[in-house]
Image: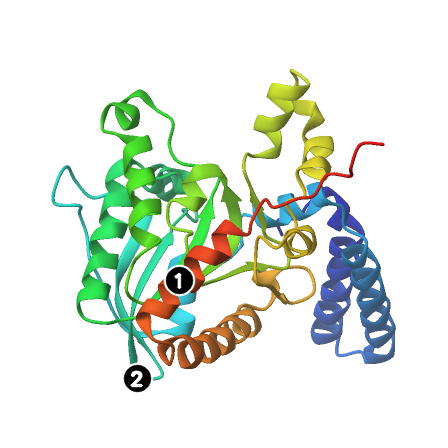
């Protein structure tokens, strides 16, 4: 079982429970009492561990290899998904998935970063780090949604846009900047969720939305903790300190007014109960679709503009 360092007490208890169950089945001996005691102890240990997570530990959960990705949520929440590929300029970037789907019969456009489940797929998906053609594909689908008056649902999960030479040559910065500009005035509702990593401009490139949510164990930041540590302390080992300073957890982001709310995850992370987290996200989408589609589109754009203009406002005390 894949586990993080701070999850070791939990994993050890889970192994003991599994061993007792296997022994009971094999030897036909009733050990249900012992199993029940261990399960109760496991529940208390889980609550204690995940109640006291620091920002760096939350970053580690956001990167968990078993965490759910965009295509997982599409399978769990949506129906009739039709993928749209290519930007009609250069090629198809598999780090971003985009297309059309339905939620409870309602037509929507869906866009999201996609990581791989194994090394081979991660290489194909470029570990969720999109090229400029990925952001142009996303905008192509957004403009299609605007044309046919379809709400847009977005799943953000990237360490950052790909910084390679080829991506820069093909206009990485311009592609992201154009998305920011166009999304700010797009005439259709936009709902976005940070489902894992929300890193830098790579996240913001599809993150200008009327409603923005962060999952409980996800993070949203101007830079990765490792990148911040390398700049400020000249050593990546300071990443835990950087995670603390960046205020990248849902609680801090809510307090700063960067996001609208936090989506509750199952104890231990989304991967421990995919159906539960999918249900939580779907409930929010349903609510927001009803609310946002009822707003006049010109008023919606004005509210979106004001939402982002308010970010970063601060007051300085008057000099004595």
Separation of residues labelled 2 and 1 (CA atoms): 29 Å
Residue 106 coordinates in the image, percent (x, y): 30, 81
Q: Which residue is mark 1?
A: 302
Farthest left residue in view: 88
Q: Nearer the viewer, residue 87 or 121?
A: 87
Label 2 Cα crowd, 10 Å radius (few <14 / some 14-19 / many 20+): few
Tell me which residue sits at (30%, 67%) in the image: 188
Q: Nearer the viewer, residue 232 or 78?
A: 232
Q: Which residue is mark 2?
A: 105
Tell me which residue sits at (24%, 44%) in the image: 136
Mark number, residue 208: none
Tell me if 82 is positioned left or right of 233 in this view: left
Q: Do the residues under discs 2 and 1 have CB atoms within 8 angstroms?
A: no
Residue 30 coordinates in the image, percent (x, y): 81, 80
| Pointer 2 or 1: first along the chain | 2
Residue 189 visible in the displayed image: no
Label 1 Cα crowd, 10 Å radius (few <14 / some 14-19 / many 20+): few
Farthest top residue in view: 234
Q: Nearer the viewer, residue 275 or 90?
A: 90
Query: Helix, strand or loop at disc 2?
Result: loop
Q: Nearer the viewer, residue 289 or 128?
A: 289
As drawn, 200 above or below 69:
above
């Amino acid at each position: 079982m894949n586990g993080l360092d701070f999850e070791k007490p939990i994993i050890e208890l889970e192994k003991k429970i599994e061993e007792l169950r296997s022994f009971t089945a094999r030897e036909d001996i009733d050990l249900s009492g012992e199993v029940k005691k261990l399960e109760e102890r496991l529940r208390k240990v889980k609550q204690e561990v995940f109640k006291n997570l620091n920002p760096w530990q939350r970053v580690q959960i956001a990167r968990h290899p078993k965490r759910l990705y965009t295509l997982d949520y599409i399978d769990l929440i949506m129906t009739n998904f039709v993928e749209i590929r290519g930007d009609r300029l250069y090629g198809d970037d598999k780090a971003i998935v985009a297309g059309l789907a339905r939620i409870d019969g309602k037509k929507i456009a869906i866009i999201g970063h996609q990581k791989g489940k194994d090394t081979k797929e991660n290489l194909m998906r470029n570990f969720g780090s999109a090229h400029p053609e990925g952001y142009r594909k996303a905008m192509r689908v957004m403009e299609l949604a605007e044309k046919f008056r379809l709400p847009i649902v977005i799943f953000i999960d990237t360490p950052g846009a790909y910084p390679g030479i080829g991506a820069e040559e093909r206009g990485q910065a311009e592609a992201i900047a154009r998305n920011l500009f166009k999304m700010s005035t797009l005439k259709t509702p936009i709902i976005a969720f940070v489902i894992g990593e929300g890193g830098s401009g790579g996240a913001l490139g599809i993150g200008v939305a009327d409603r923005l949510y962060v999952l409980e164990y996800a993070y949203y930041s101007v830079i990765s903790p490792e990148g911040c540590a390398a700049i400020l302390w000249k050593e990546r080992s300071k990443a835990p300190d950087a995670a603390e300073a960046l205020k990248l957890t849902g609680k801090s982001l809510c307090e700063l007014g960067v996001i609208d709310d936090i989506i509750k995850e199952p104890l231990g992370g989304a991967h421990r109960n995919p159906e539960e987290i999918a249900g939580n996200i779907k409930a929010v989408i349903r609510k927001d679709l009803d609310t946002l589609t009822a707003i006049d589109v010109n008023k919606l754009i004005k509210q979106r503009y004001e939402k982002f203009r308010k970010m970063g406002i601060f007051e300085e005390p008057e000099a004595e």
